Structure formats: structure tokens, C-alpha cells
Amino acid sequence: MSATTEPATTEPGITSPSITQAHLLDRWEHQPNPETAEQWLVRAEEVADILAVDAVERDRANVPPHAEVRLLKSAGLVTVLGPKAFGGAELPWHIANRIVRIIARADGSIAQLLGYHYLWAWAARLVGTDAQIAAVEELYTANNFFFGGAVNPRDSDLVVTEKGEELVFNGAKSFATGGRVADLTVLEGILEGTDTHIFAIVPTDQPGIVFADDWDNLGQRLTESGSVRISDVRVDWSAAAGFVDRVYQPLVYNTLNVPALQAVFNNLYLGIAEGALRAAAAYTREYTRAWPYGGEGKHHGTDEFYVLEGYGELASKLWADAALIDRIDLEISEVLHAPREQLTERRRGEVAVQVAAGKLRIIEDGLDVATKIFELTGARASANSVGLDIYWRNLRTHSLHDPVPYKKHEVGRYVLLGEIPQPTWYS
């Protein structure tokens, strides 16, 4: 499951002055990496502060986020899950998810890229052999490589054919998050003539991987999530994740990829919603005016009863969601860091149900926040120059990955019948 490549993100690209200025990108060059989880969270806040300055302008420009990924690399956030022996931080998953949340408050697109990177960086642990895990973690950690993935399950699978000691991937995917800013790409396909799925990590920069540059959606515009064509991409059989002598070695732990990724989504959505509430509150404090016909002589929007009530309601929802998601993150983090052989189907299912519960809550509450902030900020806040729409656009776009009613169904079957969801690409 190993791959070698030159970094694909050495060119900063052209985005905006605040991101591409060298003194911002290289501000940590002569600083030691943080040593504690709390210090890493502070580092994430520093990165978020930089991204927040012009998130709306960069979103509208819709330029590949080379500089943004360079910023993540420079800050050390790319390797926080990697082994300390190779320069990583070996942070637990619940801290990595908190980092995603912090970045999402400032820029949902870049938080999505980072969250997917964390999942794909863990892919070797999810499905690989011990030797593959060691090789991949050294590769990406020592080289500060960034992951993307072409594993959209709603598309037809890539076709994998055997050519002697090699496997050859061919096909196309309509979504491939990470695209051109990734150094490494995770591929998944079905071995021709079988129903056997094969994962492999390959260098992104090669002739057989061609991105169409056709991602132009309502939100999450800087995630490089457009389509990709895979043509004759070759890997050694030894790089097929989890295979020994060309036979797959299954574990229940292999199926944690979906709950782990959906837990990342929970933090992405929560961060976007928190960012929306924070931006709206700042606008209200400075600009929102009292309604002149209220009859009580109010002078500022912050005097209005309905404004105070509205912020109280929205904040209460997000505080409750954060408490739920924090608890879920601790639970899934414990499972992800435990010995792989110990995970049972029941335990896996219980974790998946908790993640689903968190997801359905933060999607509904987050969209409520991103919509109602306009009622609390006033008509002038709908101006494009204010940019409050970015939060709703980002959350609405990404939260369409799978229908929320199916999440409610999973939770309901568990509560009423004690049934756990069967592992699928979405549960």
C-alpha cells in the first residue's frame, strides 16, 4: 500500500494576498512543533485566523487551494496523526476532529480537505497489513504529504485487472475530493471477474490520473471535488491494502472507515455553524439596528428582545450539539486507537449509531443557524459584500451526502429494536 511521489503542492498558486504572503505561510518555520494537544489546538486557531480573513473572496475566486494546503503543511496540521518517530504528533482522533472543527469555523472547504486527509492518512490502519501501515505512515509523515481520494461509492467502481505482479486501475469517478492539491490519492476498485474490493495509495502526479476541473457547486467550492479519469494506473500487488498472498484478511475494524469519516463530517458541520453564528454576532454588534417602530425607544440591534432571544436559541442548540459530538468523538477515538483485532460487530454498530445521531442533529441545527442568522442581522446583512451566505452554502452542499431520514431510521431501529446498522458505504 505504499507509494512514492514528489509533493504536488509546492507551487503556492494564486489565491489571495493574505494566504500567499510568505510571512504568513512560513511563520512557524523557526518554531518547534506544539507538544501537547492543547498547544496543537492553539496552532489550529492561528491557522483559522489566517483563513478567515478572506474566506469569502477565495471561495468566489474558486482557484485550486494550493496555498491553503501549503499553509496546513507549514503549520504541521497535516501530520498530527502520524508517528512521532517520523515527525508526527501521534494525536488521538478526537483532537484531530477538533482541529477540523476549528478550521471549519473559518473556511469549510479547507476543513473538508483536512478532514478527508486525516481519514485517508488512517486508511492503511483501517485496512492495511502491519507492513503497509508502517510504510505508508513513514511516507506521508516524513514527507508532509497530503492525501486525496477517488472513492465515491455512488459511482461505478473502478475496474482492477491483474497484469503479472501488478494491478491496473481504470475507470472514472464523478467526485474525487482533494484533486490536484493532493500528493497521494487513494483509489478503490473491484478486481475484474470478482466482487473483491481493492484499495491502493498512488502518487497523484502521474499521466494516468486526469482531473476534469469541473467542480463548480453551490458550496465547498475549494475542495477540488470534481471528476477524475483513471487510466492504466499501476501498482504492485503488494500495495493492495490488506492482502496477503493476494488474499484479503478481513477484520471488523476495516469497516470503521464510514463511522470515522462521518464523525469528521459532524465536526465539519459544527464548525461551519459555529462560524456562522460568530460572524453574525459580530455583524449584529456593529451594524444591526433596532426596529424603529417597536415603541420602546431602542437604539441598537443588541437591545432588541427578538434578537437576544434568537441568538440565545441558536447558541443553545450548538452548545448541545457540541456536547454530543464531543462525547461521540471520545468514543470513536477510543475504538480507532484500540487494538484492531478487539473490535466486535456490536461495538462497531453502537458507535455508528452514535455518529449517525450526531450527524442528524448538527445538520438540522446547523442549517437552522445558517438560515436564521439573516433574521437576526437584518436586511443589509444579505449583501454579497458581507458574505454570510457562505456558511449556508457550504453546509447545505456537503450535508447532502446521504439523506438525514436514513440516519434517523438507523437510530430508531437501535432504540426500538436493539438493531445495529449493517456496514455499508454510508453506515
Image (cartoon, rainbow, N blue to C red):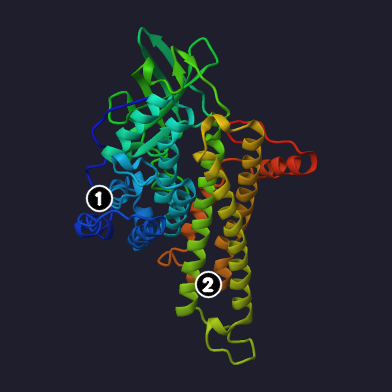
Closest to the camera, between mark 1 and mark 2, is: 1
Outermost residue, right direction?
Answer: 416
> Residue 274 in the image: x percent, y percent?
51, 62
Q: Residue at x 48, y 27 (%)?
A: 127
Instruction: Tell me which corner region of the image, top left, top right, bottom left or bottom right, holds residue 124.
Output: top left
- Give the class, few, some or many, for how many residues have Cα within 10 Å of label 1's Cα (few <14, many ≥20): some
> Residue 417 in the image: x percent, y percent?
79, 39
Identify residue for label 1.
14
In this rendering, does residue 206 appear at all? yes
Q: Secondary structure at mark 1?
A: loop
In this rendering, does residue 229 appear at all? no
Q: Secondary structure at mark 2?
A: helix
Mark drawn on residue 379: 2
- Give the class, few, some or many, for how many residues have Cα within 10 Å of label 2's Cα (few <14, many ≥20): few
Outermost residue, bottom direction?
Answer: 297
In depth, the one of 189 and 391 nearer the eye is 189
User: Disc count in the image?
Assistant: 2
Marks 1 and 2, the one that precedes in the sequence: 1
Question: What amino acid does circle 2 point to?
Answer: Ala
